[in-house]
Image (tube, rainbow, N blue to C red):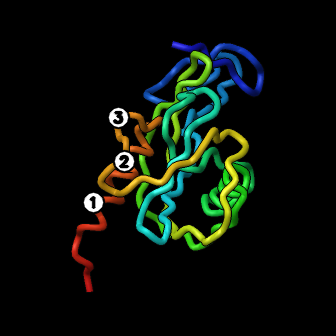
Amino acid sequence: MKKIYCIKCGDSTKKIGKSLFICLRCDFHYYENPRPTNAVILENKNGEILLVNRAHPPKKGWWDLPGGFIGFNESFEEGARREIKEELGISVSNFRYVNSHYNLYLYKGLYYHTLCVNFAAKLPHKKIIPRDDVASIRFFSKDNIPFKKIAFAAVKKGLEGYLLSLHQPKRP
């Protein structure tokens, strides 16, 4: 278990429950909460889903959805627009909420707790230029998603939930 030090005075803390740390010197209460992330399921005009191949660790070479960590002073939607612009060079804004899932994100030997909000949107008819941390892109038919090579559990669950929702009858 990693040692958590007080962010106020630097002394040792005692863990209470799953996420509360209390400083043994100044009694400061610190809650370790998940870091917010997003992912966007983009469909082209043929109904295929765009996946990105990760260029860097963690999970270099694995398939993922475009998205990433939410920045300070950003909403989930603002973060999604920024990530798509950074990773694909296009602007997308017609997001709809799909679902959200918890994830453990292993990076350089440490696990980070994340909470991923998954969105869906139609892909505009614009040229996509893989950049930032995207090695390449590929479109997959809905029945050919490489679930065994999806980088993160929250993205995999998001895709599964999205595909399942397509087969649900619409409520009035």
Is residue 74 in view from this perspective?
no
Q: Which of pointers 3 and 1 indicates the residue nearer the eye?
A: 3
Please rate how many residues cluster around mark 3, counting C-alpha atoms within 10 Å: few if below 14, some from 14 to 19, many from 20.
few
Please rate how many residues cluster around mark 2, counting C-alpha atoms within 10 Å: few if below 14, some from 14 to 19, many from 20.
some
Q: Which of pointers 2 and 1 indicates the residue nearer the eye?
A: 2
Which disc, if any, is residue 148?
3
Which disc, if any, is residue 114?
none
Question: Which amino acid, mark 1?
Answer: Leu
Which disc, if any, is residue 145?
2
Task: Give the residue furthest to the bottom.
Answer: 172
In the rendered structure, the answer to whether residue 112 lies left or right of residue 168 reads: right
Residue 152: percent from left, percent from top: 46, 37
Q: CA distance from mark 2 to mark 3?
A: 9 Å
Q: Nearer the viewer, residue 24 or 59?
A: 59
Element marked by disc 2: loop
Residue 41: percent from left, percent from top: 48, 58
Marked residue nearer the N-terminal end (3 or 1)? 3
Q: CA distance from mark 3 to mark 1?
A: 18 Å
Residue 8: percent from left, percent from top: 76, 27
Residue plotted at (58% across, 36% down): 54
In the rendered structure, the answer to whether residue 101 lies left or right of residue 136 reads: left
- Circle 1 is placed at which residue position? 164
Please rate how many residues cluster around mark 1, counting C-alpha atoms within 10 Å: few if below 14, some from 14 to 19, many from 20.
few
Residue plotted at (67% across, 18% down): 5
The quadrant where residue 128 appears: bottom right
Question: Which amino acid, mark 2?
Answer: Ile
Q: Are marks 3 and 1 in contact (CB under 8 Å)?
A: no
Question: Which amino acid, mark 3?
Answer: Lys
Residue 57: percent from left, percent from top: 61, 26
Locate the C terminus by quadrant.
bottom left
Element marked by disc 1: helix
